[in-house]
Image (tube, grey):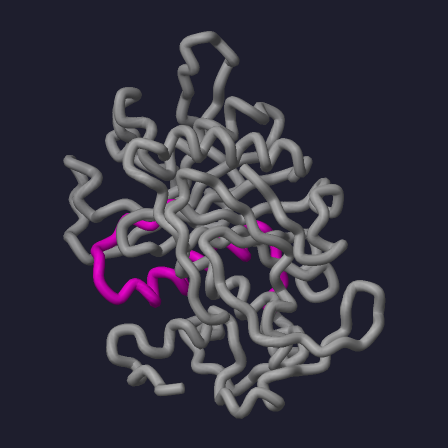
C-alpha cells in the first residue's frame, strides 16, 4: 500500500487520534454512496465554492485495487469556462492560491480539519481483484495502524436475502452493526460482540446467521473488520451494515450517513455555513455530489 499525500494536512502524522470512515464494496454500493454524501456535505459544501480537490488529503495505491479515473466527483454544479472553474481557496498555510479541477482516482482520503474536525473519509471507487480481498484488507489495516487512527467505522451492505431465517421482506432496508473481538490466538478466531454505542442510536447488532463461515470470511466487509481487529486489537473498530435490495440505493445511503454521524457525534447543524446551497438534497439534508446527477436518468450527461 503506497500513500501519496496531497498537502501537509494529509501527512500520516496528521491522522493520529482521528476517526476513519471507510466503505466496503457491497450490495447496492451503500457504503461507497454514504461516504460520498459525507464528503460532499460535511467537507466540500463547507469549503470555498469551486475549490475542486480541496477536500482531498491524499491518494493511495494498491496492486489489488483495479485502477479507475474520472472527473472530479465533487465538482461545483454549473460548470462554466476554464477560468470560472478555477476558484480561490485558502491552503493549509493560510495563503491564497488557485486550484484547478482534479481527477478522481480509485482510492482517496478526504477531510478538512477546519470544517469537519477529527474525521477522515476514505473513498474506494475501484473494485478489488477477485481473490485479493484478504490481501487488500490486511494491507489497508496495516496502513490504518501506521496512521495511528483512534477509531475505524466501516460502512457496508448485504443483500436482503443474507439472513436465511429473517422475517423481513425483500426491499425492507434495515441497519445492523457488527464488531469483532479477538483473543489473539494463532487460529485467528473472532467473536461477534455487541457495541452499546450503536444500540444507543437504534442500530441493533447483526444476526449471527448474516455472517459467513470462516472459510468465506475473506469477503468484504468481514475481511477488513477481521484484519483491523487482528492488526490493531486496541483500535475501536466497528461496522454499520445496510441489509437491503439493489437498485437506486441513494436513500439507503442517506440513512446510512445519518446513522454514522449520530454514532460518531459529528455535527450536521451548520447548514447556514454551507457554501454550496444550490445542490440537490436527499433526506436529512445530505447534498448530492455532482457525480450522481446523471445516475438513474436524473440528468442527461452534458457534452463538453
Q: Is residue 208 above or below residue 62?
A: above
Q: Residue at x 49, y 63 (%)?
A: 104
Is residue 5 covered in magenta? no
Q: Is residue 72 visible?
A: yes
Residue 153 rendering spot, x and y as whole percentages: 51, 43
Residue 237 rendering spot, x and y as whole percentages: 53, 35
On screen, residue 9 versus residue 68, left or right, reads right
Viewer-closest of 189 and 265:
189
Q: Residue at x 43, y 61 (%)?
A: 69
Is residue 266 covered in magenta? yes
On screen, residue 119 versus residue 81, left or right, reads right
For the N terminus, give its image quadrant.
top right
Q: Residue at x 74, y 47 (%)?
A: 14
On screen, residue 243 versus residue 8, left or right, reads left
Query: In which quarter of the view is residue 177 placed?
Result: top left
Q: Residue at x 57, y 23 (%)?
A: 233
For the C terminus, give its image quadrant.
bottom left
Q: Is residue 165 above or below residue 18?
A: above
Residue 8 rendering spot, x and y as whole percentages: 76, 54
Q: Which residues are magenta?
A: 241-268
Viewer-closest of 209 and 142:
142
Residue 259 rendering spot, x and y as whole percentages: 47, 55
Query: Farthest residue toward the top?
Result: 186
Q: Is residue 258 visible?
A: no
Amino acid at each position: 500500500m503506497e500513500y501519496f499525500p496531497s498537502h501537509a494536512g494529509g501527512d500520516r502524522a496528521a491522522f493520529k487520534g482521528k476517526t476513519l470512515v471507510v466503505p466496503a464494496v457491497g450490495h447496492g454500493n451503500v457504503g461507497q454512496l454514504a461516504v460520498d454524501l459525507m464528503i460532499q456535505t460535511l467537507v466540500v459544501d463547507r469549503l470555498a465554492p469551486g475549490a475542486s480537490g480541496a477536500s482531498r488529503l491524499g491518494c493511495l495505491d494498491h496492486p489489488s485495487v483495479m485502477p479507475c479515473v474520472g472527473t472530479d466527483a465533487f465538482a461545483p454544479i454549473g460548470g462554466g469556462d476554464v477560468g470560472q472553474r478555477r476558484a480561490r481557496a485558502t491552503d493549509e498555510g493560510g495563503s491564497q492560491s488557485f486550484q484547478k479541477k482534479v481527477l478522481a482516482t480509485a482510492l482517496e482520503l478526504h477531510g478538512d480539519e477546519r470544517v469537519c474536525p477529527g474525521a477522515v473519509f476514505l473513498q474506494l471507487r475501484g473494485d478489488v481483484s477477485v481473490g485479493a480481498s484478504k490481501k487488500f484488507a490486511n494491507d489497508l489495516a496495516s496502513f490504518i495502524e501506521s496512521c495511528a487512527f483512534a477509531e475505524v467505522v466501516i460502512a457496508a451492505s448485504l443483500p436482503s436475502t443474507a439472513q436465511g431465517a429473517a422475517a423481513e421482506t425483500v426491499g425492507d432496508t434495515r441497519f445492523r452493526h457488527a464488531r469483532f473481538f479477538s483473543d489473539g490466538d494463532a487460529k485467528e478466531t473472532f467473536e461477534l460482540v455487541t457495541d452499546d454505542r450503536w444500540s444507543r442510536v437504534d442500530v441493533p447488532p447483526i444476526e449471527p446467521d448474516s455472517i459467513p463461515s470462516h472459510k468465506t470470511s475473506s469477503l468484504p466487509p468481514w475481511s477488513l473488520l477481521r484484519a483491523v481487529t487482528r492488526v490493531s486489537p486496541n483500535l475501536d473498530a466497528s461496522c454499520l451494515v445496510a441489509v437491503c435490495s439493489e437498485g437506486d440505493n441513494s436513500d439507503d445511503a442517506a440513512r446510512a450517513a445519518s446513522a454514522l454521524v449520530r454514532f460518531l457525534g459529528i455535527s450536521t447543524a451548520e447548514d447556514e455555513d454551507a457554501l454550496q446551497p444550490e445542490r440537490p438534497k436527499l433526506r436529512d439534508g445530505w447534498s448530492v455530489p455532482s457525480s450522481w446527477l446523471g445516475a438513474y436518468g436524473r440528468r442527461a450527461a452534458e457534452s463538453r
